[in-house]
Image (cartoon, grey):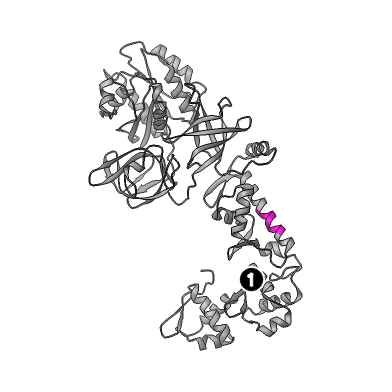
Amino acid sequence: MTVVATAGHVDHGKSALVRALTGMEPDRWAEERRRGLTLDLGYAWTTLPRSGAVAFVDVPGHRRFIGNMLSGLGPSAAVLLVVAADGGWSAQSTEHLLAAHALRLRHGVLAVTRCDLADPGPALAEARERLAGTSLSGIPAACVSARTGEGLEDLRSLLDSCVAGMPVPPADAPVRLWVDRSFTVRGAGTVVTGTLPAGSVAAGDRLLLTSARGSPRRPVLVRGLQTLGRDAARVGGPARVALNLRGVEVDEVGRGQALLGGERPWWPTSTTDVLLDADVLPARVSVHVGTAAVPGRLRVLEACHARLHTEAPLPLVPGDRVILRDPGREGALVGAEVLDAVVPPLRRSGAARRRAAALRQDAHGVELDGRVVTAATARLWGEALAALVRERADADPLDPWLPLGTTLTTLRHQVGVPDRATLEAVAARQQLAVRDDRVGPTARHDRGPAHPPTAVPDDPPGLTALLHRLARDPLDAPNRPELEALGIGGREIAAASGRGTVLRLPGEVLLGAQAPARALAALADLPQPFTTSAARTALGVSRRVAIALLEHLDARGHTLRDAADTRRLLTRDPSS
């Protein structure tokens, strides 16, 4: 299925044309039918020979309903631009074309209607001239009459070819469904409708409902769904869908909210960096994306690069197109592309100019734990984290590890790192290690070419000697007198454990990092199940060490202890 939005001036015959193409009434309200004026979004669908089902979102043409029009156009992939032969190009023809161009809609058909009432030639010529230089330049055109049926088959054929030539969105894309209607069905409860551009939704899915009004996200369950009036177990985009939801009342959901799902997490944000199509907007704007419309503020960074603040968080990612409208001037709207949805603060002098320069250099985004940021932001976060780790290592070479919590607090304030998952992804990108709620250097960072893989240049001699010993035999656990003789205390043990060069177990048991692998290999040769005594003999260790090591293997699912106090080996792979 493809979803096509209408566009065009009021009273140019958009609804009549949809009615003629589909045989369905798109005007939902009695007042609309009585006045012959579309006030809100309408919906209808038909089937075309090559491309199959096509759904239409019929938008109002009157200038007072521009917000409703943008809600219909925003989630759609194609446009049916309507110009009346007897009315010619008009004010909202221009405004709707500006909106389609701002969204970079490139697929569509031009329909010159009422060709039975006037010569369509002049209107067609002017429309083609107006389309030149926009994203819809060169779209095919048909001259039609919804009243007589003249040209309708030509229009259907052009729509069929247009839809058949459109790219197919990925089936595994994350779900972002902008809600355009909500209502209650007796016996079912809350139902919402919207356009699903990509991905898929199925009965039983759990989605997150976010609000354009700023209320917190909440989980909802999809109890059932329909598309084009028929029940379905699963619907893939692009499609018009109706979802029966559990977990939300009808008065808690409406147009402008979004349902989010898929494996990639979404992070609604109130601050983004954008590239404007023009630099003629005021500081205060109305921000339109999907079906949402929220107040926003623009801070120009440099030329057409700007920072956009919205009064409510929106689920945006780099590459999204948004429309910025001056609410005080008719027809004053500009498109913008989201460059970064996770942005660093601009606190220091010259920060805006430097940020604009960084945005100009970035052509592609970087994914960090499912969150897409600009390369400049990823670089900024990585350099800031690496600097903190270096400072810690310089101040305390024995323990160069930082607590994750305080590190996140510092970096959130300094450069805007949003959460722990992103911080861990930044650490991995910088080839830093995260373990035991701390972040620090990996062995690659720790050692120089003249040092064994278990030691670092600044280790005291006693610790170096112990690490050499455990490298030779990871099961050769030292006792307390041996540690005291080597001058090793809690601080040295914590440093080695933090680097992952020793395995620290309860009961003051210290083993080499390869101890689990060595133990699993030895235990695999025993008859299964085996006793603690048999394991102790196979490992060649004391009972104290054997018990600590076996309990460690139990906890990680490598061995299973039964009621008779014997164990079975579950896996030989220590990394599983």
Relative image position of residue 110 (x, y in whole percent): 40, 22
Relative image position of residue 22 (x, y in whole percent): 28, 29
453 lies above or below 302: below
Q: Is residue 93 left or right of residue 11?
A: right
Q: What residue type is labelled 1?
A: Ser
Which image quarter is the N terminus in? top left
Q: In this orientation, does residue 232 appear?
A: yes
Is residue 462 within the magenta segment? Answer: no
Q: Quadrant location of residue 280?
A: top right
Relative image position of residue 108 (x, y in whole percent): 41, 28
Magenta span: 385-391
> Would you say the magenta stretch is mainly helix, strand or loop?
helix
Q: In this orientation, does residue 240 appear?
A: no
> Seen from this angle, which residue lies furthest left?
187
Q: Quadrant location of residue 275?
A: top right
Say few, some or many: other residues with alpha carbon within 10 Å of mark 1 (under 14 / 14 to 19 / 20 or more).
many
66 lies above or below 431: above
Q: Is residue 432 left or right of residue 71?
A: right
- Residue for point 53% across, 52% down: 369
Q: Is residue 485 left or right of residue 339?
A: right
- Residue for point 39% across, 34% down: 164
277 or 186, which is in the foreground?
186
The secondary structure type at the circle numbered 1 is helix
- Residue for point 42% across, 81% down: 562
Q: Quadrant location of residue 423?
A: bottom right
178 lies above or below 278: below
Is residue 390 within the magenta segment? Answer: yes
In the picture of the structure, the residue carrying the numbered disc 1 is: 497
151 lies above or below 26: above
131 or 493, which is in the foreground?
493
Relative image position of residue 293 (x, y in whole percent): 44, 34
